[in-house]
Image (cartoon, rainbow, N blue to C red):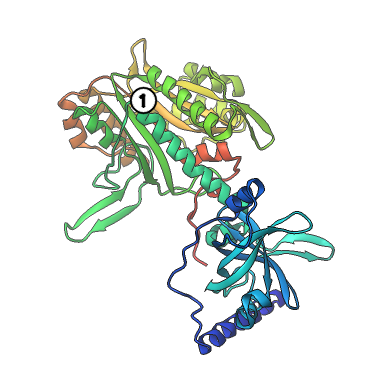
Amino acid sequence: MSQDLKETNELIQQRIEKIKNLKEKGVDPYPIRFFPDSDSASLIEMYSKTPSGPEKKFLLGGRLHSKRVMGKASFAHLKDKSGVIQLYATRDDLGEENYTLFKSLDLGDLIGIEGYLFQTQKGETTLHLTSVTLLAKCVRPLPVVKEKDGVIYDAFADVEQRYRMRYVDLVVNDNVRETFITRSRIVSEIRNFLTSEGFLEVETPMMQPIAGGAAARPFVTHHNTLDMQLFLRIAPELYLKRLIVGGLDRVFELNRNFRNEGISTKHNPEFTMMEAYMAYGDMGKMLELTEKLITTVAQKICGTLKIKYGNDLVDLSPPWRRVKYVDIIKEYSGIDFSQVKTLEEAKEKASSVKVDAGKCTSIWKVADEVFSEKAEPNLIQPVFVTDYPKELSPLAKSNPENPGYVERFEPYIVGREIGNAFSELNDPFDQKERFEDQVKQREAGDDEAFMMDEDYIRALEYGMPPTGGLGIGIDRLVMLLTNSQSIRDTILFPLMRPE
């Protein structure tokens, strides 16, 4: 057993003994209720404007952040949701029993306090305690900053442990709390924006009989009563377009999706998307909507459209650059895939730029490998990549002037895809042919290819107006607006291996 672990176990036992002693004295270390009427930040601000005396008392609840005992008087700090405030406790004011309790408190204990405000000689606004109540014992010591061999380090810097024990991470790392508060604000601003644009928020099934709406490997489950296989949603797209058929002309959903794929700084198997569909819209309308949505949200959250991300300064000011898919690949690799005639030639050209496309089964899948490795990492400033190959876009409408390509775009910022949008395919006969082609690819071993969805074809046969569709990855947008380098820094409880 390491020395650190031994010390931790000893501290835990000491704190358990304190709980036993309190119970023996008739004190409940986990009382049923306590109602604060203030928070630290508002009290400090209020006192700076209108000082009050002992006649005005306040109730606060939070964690004991520090403590310095000096005989009959002690100083401490309380940390609550809004910040930190200094406490001053004396035996004369609290009484012998309550002051003894105060001195026995450990860092991290949740306490309820009552007191009045004053200012110390050093000018710090402080709460002079008149009572203190233990609300919940912190049995396990919180990580603290320690010094070892002359080096100061964070005892909770282990990233895996931070993700695994997010509840502790939130307690000790203020910047983590701020990230998730900002995430909530981002989601609210997206809702506000779309609602103001006339979109209706809806909900669609998370368990689906057919995994559709995206090229991804699904999670599989089973419903016992119906004795049927179900898939966790990989995308809500096909259900949302059924609503367009039904006459709900503008709909959106903030949805949880589940894809049985790898984990990286850009991927988590469970993630959040916003998908929106506009009847009588097209790729162009969705491009305008995307640019307006992201810039509006960024301005409200960051207060500027020039935001720092890592070592880059990203300028979100519209209009963003537009460039065709084949042109951006050519720009960064020198390969013009529109002129490639055979799969063998495509693989040779990919190999010439050190891209391994050996497992690819078509020219455009080779092109997509080259795009991912050569172009994507360089797309730091916002850009709309447009005009994707038809083969890579089984739900998008073909370009009338060039049927081999579709009306589709993806916005890229800081080397990452932020979303996906296109003019939706509404021809049931064309859609069925594309599904059939996807089924062939699936039978050939591509387990990310689409499945046949006969009910969706039937819905299109009732008629869907020309429609624009858009999906934006919420986690990746939060990464951008909070300067987070890993998607797991924006997800409260990312998927982890069991301990």
Q: Where is residue 399 shown, x and y percent of the image?
A: 36, 15
Give the residue at the far top of this rendering: 401
- Write down the quadrant of residue 245 in the picture: top left
Secondary structure beneath dot 1 equals loop
Residue closest to the eye, 11 or 436? 11
Residue at horizontal 28 percent and vertical 38 percent from the top: 202
Amino acid type of the residue that numbered disc 1 sits on in the rendered structure: Glu
Residue at the image point whose x is 41% and y is 30% from the top = 193
Q: Quadrant of residue 83?
A: bottom right
Where in the figure is residue 51, as x and y percent of width and height? 65, 52
Q: Which quadrant is the N terminus positioned in?
A: bottom right
Q: Position of residue 440 (x, y in %)?
A: 30, 36
| Depth check, front residue: 451 or 425 | 425
Residue 390, above or below 76: above
- Location of residue 351 with respect to 389 vertically, above or below: below
Crowdedness near tag 1: few (<14), some (14–19) or many (≥20) residues, C-alpha within 10 Å: few
- Foreground pick, 442 / 265: 265
Say which quarter of the image contains residue 191: top left
* Residue underneath mark 1: 197
Q: Residue at x 60, y 43 (%)?
A: 485
Q: Is residue 1 visible?
A: no
Whether residue 64 sits left or right of residue 289 in the image: it is right
* In this picture, residue 174 sits left or right of residue 447: right
Which residue corresponds to the image point at 75% horizontal and 65% vertical from the top-left? Answer: 146
